[in-house]
Structures are given as C-alpha cells and as structure tokens.
C-alpha cells in the first residue's frame, strides 16, 4: 500500500457501481478501476467507526473541490466513512467540515 502524504495509503481495485449506503449517503456509486485512500490495507471501507479514517471531512472536501465537484456522493472523487463525515440537509449531502476527527476516506475513479 503506497503511503499518502495526507495519511494512510492507497489501494487499487475495481468497483461494480454498487456501494453500500453506509459508504456515503445517497451515493451514486462508481464503476471501473478505483484508487481508495485508506488508513490501513486491512481496514474495510465499510468501517463506520469515527476517527478511524485517513482524513477529516474538511480535508476530504478540500481535495474533492480541487479535483472534482466537492460533493461527497457524486463525481469521480467520492467519500466514504463514518456517518459524522457527512451532513444531509434538504435532500443534499455535503461534508461535515466542522468535524475535526478523521472520519472520511476518498475513492477516486481512475478508469472506466
């Protein structure tokens, strides 16, 4: 697992477009080759325990805005993590940026 400067490391895999809801509320899913930022190669991305992921919601949002659309459940950069990583208001999902715990990870689609 190559290390990431922000913490954790990267794992490459394939996504079939069927993410469990616990990964990101209202997630549109991804299909294709993905790069996952995880705390440890042994951690499951379905882990919903707070403070056990590589990024805070603010840092995940910053990366998502720089590379994609800034929405945790859409685009080619999507978030997963503890429920405290997300805020759901008016049917929309956003990062809970006031939360300073490491409650988020990111998934990057790198090929279809």
Image (spheres, grey):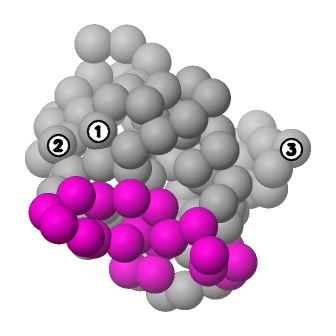
Q: Considering the numbered disc 1 on the image, is that residue within a helix, a strand or a loop?
A: loop
Up/down of 86 relative to 18, above or below: below
The answer to whether mark 2 and mark 1 are in CB contact below 8 A is yes
**Earlier sequence position, callout 2 versus callout 1:** 2
| Residue range highlighted in magenta | 83-102
Tell me the mark number nearer the camera, choosing from 2 and 3: 2
Q: Position of residue 91 (x, y in %)?
A: 14, 63
39 with respect to 48 (left or right)? right
Q: Position of residue 36 (x, y in %)?
A: 52, 43
Is 92 within the magenta? yes
Label annotation for residue 62: none
Q: Nearer the viewer, residue 24 or 2?
A: 24
Q: Which mark is residue 74?
A: 1
Q: Which residue is mark 2?
A: 28
The image quarter in which residue 77 lies? top left
Identify the residue under disc 3.
Answer: 5
Q: Is residue 108 left or right of residue 28?
A: right
């Amino acid at each position: 697992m190559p290390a990431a400067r922000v913490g954790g490391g990267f794992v490459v895999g394939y996504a079939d477009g069927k993410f469990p809801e616990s990964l990101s509320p209202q997630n549109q899913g991804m299909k294709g080759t993905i790069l996952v930022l995880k705390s440890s190669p042994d951690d499951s991305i379905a882990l919903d325990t707070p403070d056990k992921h590589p990024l805070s919601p603010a840092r995940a949002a910053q990366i998502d805005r720089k590379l994609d659309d800034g929405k945790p459940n859409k685009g080619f950069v999507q978030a997963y993590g503890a429920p405290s990583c997300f805020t759901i208001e008016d049917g929309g999902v956003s990062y809970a940026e006031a939360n300073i715990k490491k409650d988020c990870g990111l998934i990057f689609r790198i090929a279809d």
